[in-house]
Image (cartoon, rainbow, N blue to C red):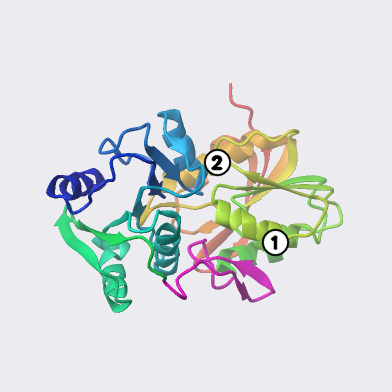
């Protein structure tokens, strides 16, 4: 879908690329076809580790720093994050260079288009195709108030626009933090650590000597590093589904994601469960919070010898699963 709009913008001249120089592609998604651009010129700029790995495996280079000759902003879901990304592109592209903004209607492209017009920005387009729109700005304009700014929320935590649960601790994570035992084990992994809410709770347990925070979104991990000042904590920008700890853990704590974009994808959470089971010592324990409607119970039964419902509420289920079954 994105490639159809990019091709249209290039073919019509709405998005007129300079003859040379790198083209920055901000936050494209796994599966996006970027054949509109020479792989030699394209620079993929993303803080989401699975996307970064997907494009790297196909020969795309990461951004090596501005200035860029042109850019494509692939709209994120968060309006604040979208504004911040556009603001960044307007600074990092050489003045006068084209900055294309692309997104589906469900991503809020119409709201962002309205915001750009309200800022008095001159633009080419929009062009509509494949349930979305693309329009082109000219780099160099200042967008005061659009830059990404850390905010402090309840509990003194720092977050950034676009990270999960940026305005307040997630209700499921709050329940899980309250349910964690004092004797959690020495080596613990916070899988999908976000900006560090659960990690801070884990580190109040005296038994913990090492905590690995594993998070795929770099902005969230950066916030976690700002929020957790404890020598026992180690921070990993990694895809939790493929993370390999230096040593097996006594406990894994997690509130796994179950959305891919706007679409529910329980398989994502299932992949977290399988990964967690493989990270534990033979008598290790998984502490899990998840929405009650998610079909995790049958999967947990194949991964752990003991699975126990330890509470929750009408929305969330708390689960303790121990003694992982070694897969042959």
Of tags 1 and 2, the one toward the viewer is: 1
| Residue 154 shown in magenta | yes
Q: Which residue is mark 2?
A: 239
Q: Which residues are magenta?
A: 143-168
Mark 1, Cα crowd under 10 Å, few <14 / some 14-19 / many 20+, is some
State whether residue 196 is above or below residue 142.
above
- Which quadrant is home to the C terminus? top right
- Of the pair 161 and 280, the residue shown nearer to us: 161
Q: Position of residue 211 (x, y in %)?
A: 75, 48
For label 1, the SS is: helix
| Residue at image coords 51%, 46% | 65
| Residue 164 shown in magenta | yes
Q: Does residue 167 appear left or right of residue 112 in this picture?
A: right
| Residue at image coords 69%, 35% | 245
Q: Is residue 271 visible?
A: yes
Q: Position of residue 79 (x, y in %)?
A: 39, 68
Mark 2, Cα crowd under 10 Å, few <14 / some 14-19 / many 20+, is many
- Of the pair 51 and 99, the residue shown nearer to us: 99
Q: Which residue is mark 1?
A: 226
Query: Label 1 vs label 2: CA separation?
Result: 20 Å
Q: Looking at this rendering, what residue extends furthest in the top direction?
A: 328
- Contact between marks 1 and 2 (CB within 8 A): the answer is no
State whether residue 3 is above or below residue 244.
below
Q: Which mark is residue 10?
A: none
| Residue at image coords 16%, 50% | 13
State whether residue 96 is above or below residue 116.
above
Q: Does residue 14 appear left or right of residue 70 in this picture?
A: left
Q: Is residue 180 visible?
A: no
Q: Looking at this rendering, what residue extends furthest in the left direction?
A: 12
Of mark 1 and mark 2, the one earlier in the sequence is: 1
Q: Position of residue 315 (x, y in %)?
A: 49, 66
């Amino acid at each position: 879908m994105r490639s159809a709009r990019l091709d249209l913008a290039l073919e019509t001249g709405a998005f007129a690329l300079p003859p040379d120089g790198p083209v920055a592609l901000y936050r494209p998604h796994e599966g996006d076809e970027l054949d509109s651009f020479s792989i030699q010129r394209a620079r993929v700029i993303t803080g989401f580790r699975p996307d970064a790995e997907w494009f790297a495996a196909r020969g795309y280079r990461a951004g090596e720093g501005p200035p860029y000759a042109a850019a494509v902003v692939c709209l994120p879901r968060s309006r604040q994050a979208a504004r911040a990304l556009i603001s960044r592109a307007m600074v990092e592209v050489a003045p006068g260079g084209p900055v294309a903004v692309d997104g589906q209607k469900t991503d809020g492209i119409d709201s962002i288009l309205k915001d750009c017009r309200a800022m008095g920005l001159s633009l080419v387009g929009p062009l509509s195709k494949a349930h979305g729109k693309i329009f082109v700005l000219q780099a160099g304009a200042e967008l005061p108030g659009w830059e990404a700014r850390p905010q402090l929320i309840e509990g003194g935590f720092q977050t950034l626009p676009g990270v999960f649960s940026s305005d307040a601790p997630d209700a499921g994570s709050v329940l899980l933090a309250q349910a964690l035992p004092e004797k959690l084990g020495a080596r613990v992994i916070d899988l999908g650590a976000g900006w560090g809410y659960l990690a801070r709770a884990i580190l109040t347990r005296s038994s913990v000597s090492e905590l690995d925070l594993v998070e795929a979104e770099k902005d969230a991990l950066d916030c976690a590093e700002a929020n957790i000042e404890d020598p026992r904590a180690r921070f990993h920008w990694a895809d939790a589904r493929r993370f390999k700890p230096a040593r097996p853990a006594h406990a894994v704590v997690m509130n796994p994601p179950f959305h891919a974009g706007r679409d529910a994808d329980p398989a994502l959470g299932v992949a977290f469960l399988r990964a967690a089971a493989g990270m534990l010592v033979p008598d290790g324990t998984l502490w899990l919070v998840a929405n009650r409607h998610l079909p995790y119970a049958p999967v947990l039964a194949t991964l752990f010898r003991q699975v126990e419902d330890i509470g929750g509420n009408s929305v969330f289920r708390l689960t303790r699963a121990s003694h992982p079954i070694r897969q042959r």
